Image (cartoon, rainbow, N blue to C red):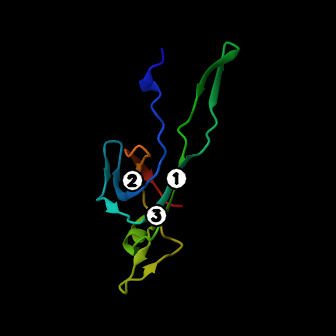
């Protein structure tokens, strides 16, 4: 007989809210530390897409013995109503000058950060998503 816990009910995504980001402060073998959460209001849409990774097939004794799948990279896209200049400065590595103008240069280097959000399902429960060590492109 099938185990009902092994195949839970499917529930469609109907909402997106509370998108937050946190800058990566320290990343060593011993420590992984993120800064203070920053709320990004105005979330419209978010999508996570795994990049296809070809498996590494290992052959031994004239037969396929094992198949190893590499951890795929993920693409994360979001559509926001607006992103305040302070948040743009943080996620894109830009600078705000003394006049409050966001300055973008070719040498700006975006830092790593974590992104988190919750998406409401059609059964009125939430799925919480965290993506660690993301970077803008």
Q: Nearer the viewer, mark 1 or mark 3?
A: 1
| SS assignment at label 1 | strand
Mark 2–mark 3 contact, CB under 8 Å? Answer: no
According to the picture, the residue beneath numbered tag 3 turns out to be 110
- Near mark 2 (Cα within 10 A), the count class, few <14, some 14-19 or many ≥20, is many
Of callouts 1 and 3, the N-terminal one: 1
| SS assignment at label 3 | loop
Q: Nearer the viewer, mark 2 or mark 3?
A: 2
Q: Residue furthest toward the left?
A: 36
| SS assignment at label 2 | strand
For residue 123, what is the image quadrant?
A: top left
Residue 25 in the image, given as x and y percentages of width and height: 33, 56
Residue 11 in the image, given as x and y percentages of width and height: 47, 41
For residue 55, what is the image quadrant?
A: top right
Residue 35 in the image, given as x and y percentages of width and height: 30, 57
Residue 51 in the image, given as x and y percentages of width and height: 59, 45
- Near mark 3 (Cα within 10 A), the count class, few <14, some 14-19 or many ≥20, is some
Q: CA distance from mark 1 to mark 3?
A: 21 Å
Residue drawn at 64 percent across, 26 percent down = 57
Report whether 29 appears left or right of 106.
Answer: left
According to the picture, the residue beneath numbered tag 1 turns out to be 47
Report whether 12 appears left or right of 64.
Answer: left
According to the picture, the residue beneath numbered tag 2 turns out to be 117
Of callouts 2 and 3, the N-terminal one: 3
- Near mark 1 (Cα within 10 A), the count class, few <14, some 14-19 or many ≥20, is few
Q: CA distance from mark 2 to mark 3?
A: 21 Å
Of callouts 1 and 2, the N-terminal one: 1
Q: Residue furthest toward the right?
A: 62
Q: Residue furthest toward the front?
A: 123
52 above or below 109?
above
């Amino acid at each position: 007989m099938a185990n009902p816990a092994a195949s839970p009910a499917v529930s469609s995504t109907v909402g997106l809210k509370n998108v937050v980001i946190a800058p990566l402060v320290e990343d060593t073998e011993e420590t992984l530390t993120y800064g203070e959460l920053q709320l990004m209001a105005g979330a419209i849409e978010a999508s996570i897409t795994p990049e296809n990774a070809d498996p590494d097939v290992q052959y031994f004794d004239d037969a396929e013995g094992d198949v190893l799948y590499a951890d795929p990279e993920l693409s994360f896209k979001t559509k926001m109503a607006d992103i305040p200049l302070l948040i743009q400065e943080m996620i894109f590595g830009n600078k705000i000058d003394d006049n409050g103008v966001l300055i973008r240069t070719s040498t700006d280097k975006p830092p790593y950060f974590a992104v988190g959000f919750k998406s409401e399902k059609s059964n009125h429960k939430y799925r919480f998503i965290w993506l660690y060590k993301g970077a803008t492109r």
